[in-house]
Amino acid sequence: MKRTMTSLLLANGLLAAGQSLAGDLLQWQDNSLTYEYGNNFKVDPENQQIITFSHASGWSFGDLYLFVDGIKYNTNATNGNDDGHSFYGELSPRLSLGKISGTDLSFGPIKDVLIATTYEFGEGDKESYLIGPGFDLNIPGFNYFQLNTYYRESDGKRDGSGVWQITPAWSYTIPVGNSDLVIDGYIDWVPDNDKSYHANFHFNPQIKYDVAKAFGFGKKVYVGIEYDYWKNKYAIDNDGYVGSEVLGGTDQSVAMLMVRAHF
């Protein structure tokens, strides 16, 4: 799977070189920094502060999403590496079959068909590689709605190989006063399977208000909350011995205060 992912990223680069001769390679991009604070986390230390860099961009051959979390544990809590901080990130390039072929692949609610990939990385033994079909959907009212289906492979001792994951992602804007309320997020769902990587469901929406637009200054600056619900976090069975007796439960429900600035 690692070799497959490397080949896809190389194909992206070669395709980009060819596409640049025909038109603009980078069509749009957005970058942001987010600060969050929350408590009642499971498995990891209970209280956390998180700073996230995220990047999203559209290209003549597809799109790209990247985020990296820098995580600080409050008080004297430590993780498995005996320190008070950690990091985690995901790199998610997608190849648009419609853009590459120059063919309109839309039908019904589907706007485009893509090859979706993701590379997960973090502190410790946390590398995973995902690949599968992706779809951009045309759902009235939404800024975007994606549905990606992945086959997962993991390196080292980390569980997670040989299972399927379903990941919808969305964004919806509601005008409120002089500004906008944005509701966006994603779901990572690994259905029931007979692998050691237990079925789990991760629901992660944000509700945020653009205060920059409301007060007429600068680019988008949001304040709001992020909700993180994760049943069987890290695919550890909440009802199993490790989940219930050793970890004190792995079903996570956390509301975090957040501030996000775009640039």
Image (tube, rainbow, N blue to C red):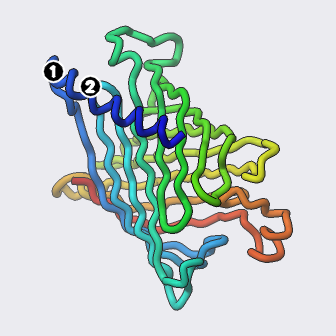
Most foreground residue, 21 or 23: 21
Instruction: Please report contact status of discs 2 and 1: CB closer than 8 Å, yes or no.
Output: yes
Most foreground residue, 261 or 45: 45
Q: Where is residue 262, by image quadrant? A: bottom left
Q: Is residue 49 visible?
A: yes
Query: In the shown orientation, is residue 242 left or right of residue 79?
Result: right
Percent of width and height locating residue 8: 41, 32
Percent of width and height locating residue 143: 40, 34
Q: Where is residue 39, by image quadrant? A: bottom right
Q: Measuring 38% from the left and 68% from the top, which residue is drawn there?
A: 51
First reached walking from the N terminus: tag 2 or tag 1: 1
Callout 1 crowding tier (Cα within 10 Å): few <14, some 14–19, many ≥20? few
Percent of width and height locating residue 119: 47, 47
Rendered image: mark on residue 64: none
Q: Which residue is mark 1?
A: 23
Location of the N terminus by quadrant is top right
Q: Measuring 16% from the left and 57% from the top, which residue is drawn there?
A: 217
Label 2 sits on what residue type? Ser
Against 261, is 49 above or below?
Answer: below
Against 2, is 105 above or below?
Answer: above
Q: CA distance from mark 2 to mark 1?
A: 8 Å
Q: Where is residue 99, by image quadrant? A: top left
Rendered image: mark on residue 60: 2
Q: Measuring 68% from the left and 50% from the top, which residue is drawn there?
A: 201
SS state under label 1: loop
Percent of width and height locating residue 34: 36, 62
Against 127, is 27 above or below?
Answer: above
Label 1 sits on what residue type? Gly
